[in-house]
Image (tube, rainbow, N blue to C red):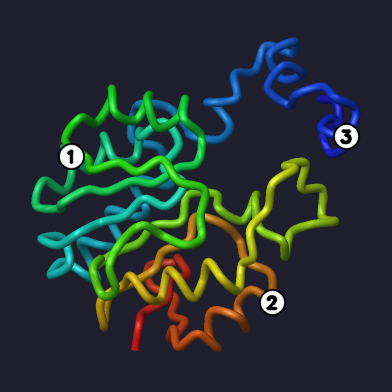
Amino acid sequence: MKDLTDIGMMGISAKEELAKQGIEIDDILYGSAELNLNTLNLLYLLERHYSTLLEGRFLDLFCGNGLLLQAMVKEAPGLELYGVDGNPQATEAARMVCPTAKLAEKICPPLPYEANFFHIVHGNKIMDYADTQRGLGNPFPETFSFLELSAEIYRVILPRGIYVPCDDLLPRELVILNSQGFLQQEKSGRMLFEKR
């Protein structure tokens, strides 16, 4: 496979380059419509350790085409589902696959929600766009401040609510989350952050 780290700099979109190689970008960024391993792990984590939160509000941050939200409708029907994404095409796709979710088209931060609102926030590949990832092969031209976004995630989560990142985090990102007031935990082999 061709190295994609400099494709954005050459004026070629990563999606176009991957399509030439027979790879659809949705296969990489969002998985399939079936329950993928990430979704199964998230559901197991929630059912095993946070079953009381499965009757609350769930935000899929950078929800993409909404396939996780679609899976959550079936697998966790007690959740009130929300999604936010800055890509209008992704948000429209999410509306089609999960019409019951409350979706917002927004490049964030700030998040368009009131304080202490969500029981669960799931970060869907958000680190691809973080300033802390700049220089690590991040081809995306628009980035956000991870410090600002982590403060926003903390703001919108209810006390004892959880933030479950889908990404591997760098040590400096872990320091930022812990300094915001999150309690870092590992449950069922997955890292998560509980609001104190």
Question: Of 140 and 166, which appears nearest the observer?
Answer: 140
Question: Of 81 and 155, which appears nearest the observer?
Answer: 155
Tell me, for residue 9, which label it has, or none: 3
Tell me, for residue 73, which label it has, or none: 1
Residues at discs 2 and 3 in contact (Cβ within 8 Å): no
Tell me, for residue 20, which label it has, or none: none
Residue 55: image x %, image y %? 10, 60
Inspect this view and state whether residue 37 appears: no
Residue at screen point 65% across, 49% down: 128
Residue beneath disc 2? 171
- Disc 3 is placed on an element classified as helix
Residue at screen point 55% across, 53% down: 126
Residue at screen point 39% across, 68% down: 163
Specify the amino acid type for callout 3. Answer: Met
- Disc 1 is placed on an element classified as helix
- Crowd around label 3: few <14 · some 14–19 · many ≥20 (10 Å): few
Quadrant of the rendering where the N terminus is positioned: top right
| Above or below for 174 versus 129 | below
Question: Of 59 and 22, which appears nearest the observer?
Answer: 59
Give how far apart the Cα atoms at labels 3 and 1 are.
39 Å
Residue 68: image x %, image y %? 34, 40
